[in-house]
Image (cartoon, rainbow, N blue to C red):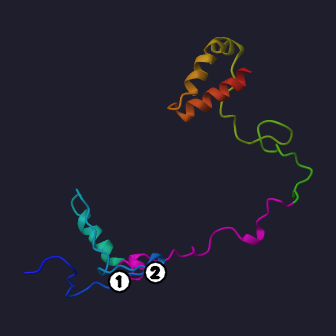
């Protein structure tokens, strides 16, 4: 009785190529099931899988297809290094500050009254310390930045 060593399989699987040449060797992608599906959801999920079977090529994955239509026309895009198309317009046009036509959007934060400024000023060091913490919320950090800019 011999043990160990190479044993030739009776029905060897097809060998798969490397990288992008690889293919599934176990046939088609198996059907998936939904855990904890509500009444009727499992059958609808199975029907959806059968209606749109996976491709047999590329191991059940197909190459991404370019979207049909839509998207910008590349011939109309202006390169970043092109000269300005509006040389007489200031860079700040459309912003709520600086020269040029202002934004049509209302300001996001109302300006503070002098009384509010006087009441908030002592809290700035504490708020800055809280906003500088790594676990601080990004909205908190933004609020403290805006508050410091408004208080001067």
Pick whichever, 59 or 110, lies toward us: 59
State the image coordinates of residue 61 (x, y, percent, origin top left).
42, 75
- Residue 40 included in the magenta stretch of the image: no
Q: Residues within 10 Å of mark 1 (few under 14, many from 20)?
A: few
Residue position marked by numbered label 2 in the rendering: 21
Q: Is residue 14 above or below residue 119?
A: below
- Residue 54 included in the magenta stretch of the image: yes
- The residue drawn where x is 51% and y is 74% is 64
Quarter holding residue 6: bottom left
Q: Residue furthest right?
A: 88
Q: Residue furthest bottom?
A: 10
**On the rendered image, what quadrant is the C terminus found in?**
top right
Please state if 129 lies on the left or on the right of 38 as rendered: right
Quarter holding residue 17: bottom left
Q: How many discs appear?
A: 2
Query: Which residues make up the magenta segment?
Result: 53-82
Pick whichever, 35 or 117, lies toward us: 35
State the image coordinates of residue 82 (x, y, percent, origin top left).
85, 61
Please state if 140 lies on the left or on the right of 151 as rendered: left
Q: How far separated are the C-alphas under marks 2 and 1?
A: 11 Å
Pick whichever, 15 or 82, lies toward us: 15
State the image coordinates of residue 29 (x, y, percent, origin top left).
32, 75
State the image coordinates of residue 120 (x, y, percent, origin top left).
63, 15
Residue position marked by numbered label 1 in the rendering: 15
């Amino acid at each position: 009785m011999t043990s160990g060593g190479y044993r030739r399989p009776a029905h060897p699987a097809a060998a798969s190529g490397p990288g992008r040449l690889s293919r599934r060797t176990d046939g088609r992608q198996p059907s998936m099931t939904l855990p904890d599906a509500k009444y009727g959801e499992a059958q609808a999920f199975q029907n959806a899988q059968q209606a749109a079977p996976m491709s047999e090529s590329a191991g059940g994955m197909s190459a991404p297809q370019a979207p049909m239509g839509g998207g910008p026309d590349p011939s109309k895009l202006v390169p970043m290094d092109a000269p300005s198309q509006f040389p007489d317009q200031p860079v700040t046009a459309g912003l709520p500050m600086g020269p040029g036509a202002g934004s049509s959007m209302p300001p996001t934060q109302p300006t503070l009254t002098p009384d509010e400024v006087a009441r908030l000023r002592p809290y700035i060091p504490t708020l800055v310390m809280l906003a500088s913490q790594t676990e601080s919320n990004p909205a908190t950090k933004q609020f403290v930045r805006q508050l410091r800019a408004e208080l001067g």
